[in-house]
Structures are given as C-alpha cells and as structure tokens.
Image (cartoon, rainbow, N blue to C red):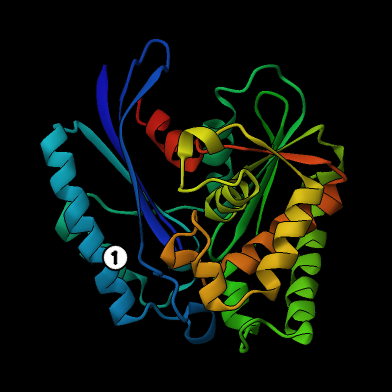
C-alpha cells in the first residue's frame, strides 16, 4: 500500500484526501477527507488577481493540511489547482506560497485534465458501463466529461457559483433581472460545452462538488451534512427545480439556517443550484446521481 495525499484547490474551497492505495489493484482506502472554504477566487473575475486576504486564507489551510499529512506519514503528495489560479495574473505568489509550506509545486491544470480526474474519481465505484455525463460544478468553472468506462470528450466552461454570483448578484435575494442574467450566462456556456461534449446523449448524469451535494442534502431532508447518506443518492429534476426556486427566493439568513448549509456556501449556493438545474434540463435527464468521490479521488489514484 502507498500512502498518498491529494489536494484540490479550487475557486471556493481547498480539499484534502489522505488515502492508502494498492498499486496492483487501484483499491483506495480513505483515511482522512476534509474541506475548508477559503474563497481563493474572491474578486478574480473582476480584477484578474488573487486578493492578498484570499491568499492568506489559503496558506493558513495549507499549513493545517501540512500538519495532518505529517501526522499520517504521507509518502507522496499531489497538489492540483483549478479555475481561480488559472485566471490570475499573480499566480506566482500562490505557487511560491504553497511550495514554501508543503514542499510541492501546485499543478495549475487545464480544464480537460480537471475533467479527467473528476470522471475517474466519480465513476470508479459505479456499477455498469453506460454512457455517463459527469459534471463538476465548481466556484469558477464547471467541467463536463462524458464517457463509456473511459473519457470520450471533455470541456471546461467558465460558469461557477462564485463567478456567477460575483458577476451578477447585488440584491438579497437576487432580483428577477439578476436571475435572468445568471441564466443567460449558463445557457451560453452550455452551448459552448455542447460544441465538444454531447450532453444530450448520456443515459446517466453524475453530479459532483459542493453545490450538488448541498442540494442533495436539502432534498434528503438531512438534519446535518452526512456524506454517507449523500453519496450515490439520486435526486430528481423536480426536486432540484423546487430547491433552486426556494434558494433563489431566500434571504442570506434563510439560506444560512438550512441544516446542511456550509457557511462558506450561503452566498453562492443559489447560483450553483441554478447551474445544476440548467444542466439537467439541457441533458433531458430526470435525475442526478450524486457522488462524494470526485477530482480528489482521481488525483490520489494518479499517484500510483
């Protein structure tokens, strides 16, 4: 067994997975999985730069993760950075800070690479080999990848819950015009995605990341976030539509009072839910299979 650490640093959160992996079978045994909201992408869509306070929040999380890795005796580390650090002019500040703390350079991967990791992590445990569309709704971008046991086509587009919220939302709850502007961005991005990925051809939709898992937790009526209950749950399009309407009509305090809501998602969850709903409508699917296993698992598996 090889003990590995995978770090996924996105626009809204930074996440860690420590696991033992059998190199001969690819079997993954999870030892620690955690997430910290750092909002690295704060203001990037507007300024093109990573904000100093966002960098410091991210570095603080890295220092915490470094201690956890040391405690577990990790042998190999892979740190992957996604949308926000692809877009930022001052990404060298981010890279140098991470190297100083963890001793590894973050890989600022392409959207296609990100999609591949997500697909491998999300589908490894699913039975059967039907055509699956995996969607990873992040803070700055959403990855679409379709495959029949392996990746056949992938595309990353710049719609994410943080980016859309910062770009369009000024009122709480958002106004009808603001919602329409978000929806227009989503539909335009779906048009782009469909140039590469045949979204309507998949028989199964698999949804990843915090917006999807939060919507699932609400649909399941959980009293607290429960990853085991959420993992591989099936949420209908009607449920997603109802929850999206509720979130778009709710105030900050009303969203914050939802039991499964992470404080770092309160301001951006409505846009994330709207992305999920629009994808389900475009794909013509009646349900989404929710996976807690995602890009982190794909990154970890790549280390062996």
Give the residue displayed 45% in from the left and 48% down from the top: 224
In the depicted structure, whether residue 240 falls above or below residue 72: below
Give the residue displayed 34% in from the left and 15% down from the top: 22
Foreground of the two, 4 or 109: 4
Residue farthest along the top direction in this orientation:
24
Give the residue displayed 50% in from the left and 62% down from the top: 83
For residue 92, what is the image quadrant? bottom left
Foreground of the two, 109 or 272: 272
Where is residue 108 shown, x and y percent of the image? 42, 56
Residue highlighted by disc 1: 58
Give the residue displayed 55% in from the left and 24% down from the top: 124
Where is residue 162 shown, x and y percent of the image? 54, 71
Where is residue 287 shown, x and y percent of the image? 77, 40
For the residue labelled by badge 1, is the local secondary structure a helix, a strand or a loop?
helix
With 57 as the anchor, is 282 left or right in this view?
right
Dot 1 surroundings within 10 Å: few (below 14), some, or many (20 or more)? many
For residue 179, what is the image quadrant? bottom right
Position of the N terminus, as image quadrant, is: top left
Q: Total of numbered circles in the picture?
A: 1
With 118 as the anchor, is 62 left or right in this view?
left
Position of the C terminus, as image quadrant, is: top left
With 203 as the anchor, is 254 left or right in this view?
left
Q: Is residue 86 visible?
A: no
Residue farthest along the bottom direction in this orientation:
170
Q: Is residue 22 visible?
A: yes
Foreground of the two, 278 or 132: 278
Where is residue 15 shown, x and y percent of the image? 36, 50
């Amino acid at each position: 067994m090889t003990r590995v650490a995978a770090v996924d640093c996105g626009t809204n959160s930074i996440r860690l997975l420590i696991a033992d992996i059998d190199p001969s079978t690819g079997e993954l045994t999870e030892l620690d999985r955690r997430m910290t909201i750092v909002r690295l992408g704060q203001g990037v869509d507007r300024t093109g730069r990573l904000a100093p306070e966002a960098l410091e929040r991210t570095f603080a999380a890295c220092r915490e993760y470094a201690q956890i890795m040391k405690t577990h005796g990790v042998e190999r580390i892979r740190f992957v950075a996604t949308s926000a650090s692809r877009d930022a002019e001052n990404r060298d500040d981010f890279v140098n800070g991470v190297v100083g703390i963890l001793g590894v350079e973050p890989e600022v991967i392409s959207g296609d690479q990100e999609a591949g990791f997500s697909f491998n992590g999300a589908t490894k445990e699913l039975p059967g080999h039907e055509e699956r569309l995996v969607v990873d709704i992040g803070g700055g971008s959403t990855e679409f990848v379709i495959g029949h046991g392996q990746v056949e086509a992938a595309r990353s587009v710049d719609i994410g819950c943080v980016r859309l919220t910062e770009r369009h939302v000024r009122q709480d709850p958002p106004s009808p015009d603001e919602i329409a502007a978000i929806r227009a961005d989503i539909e335009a991005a779906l048009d782009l995605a469909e140039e590469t990925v045949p979204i309507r051809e998949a028989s199964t939709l698999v949804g990843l990341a915090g917006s999807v898992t939060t919507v699932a937790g609400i649909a399941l009526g959980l009293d607290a976030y429960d990853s085991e209950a959420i993992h591989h749950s099936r949420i209908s399009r009607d449920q997603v539509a109802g929850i999206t309407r509720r979130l778009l009509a709710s105030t900050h305090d009303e969203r914050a009072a939802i039991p499964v809501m992470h404080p770092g998602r309160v301001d951006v969850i409505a846009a994330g839910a709207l992305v999920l709903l629009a994808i389900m409508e475009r794909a013509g699917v009646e349900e989404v299979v929710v996976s807690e296993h995602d890009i982190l698992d794909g990154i970890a598996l790549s280390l062996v």
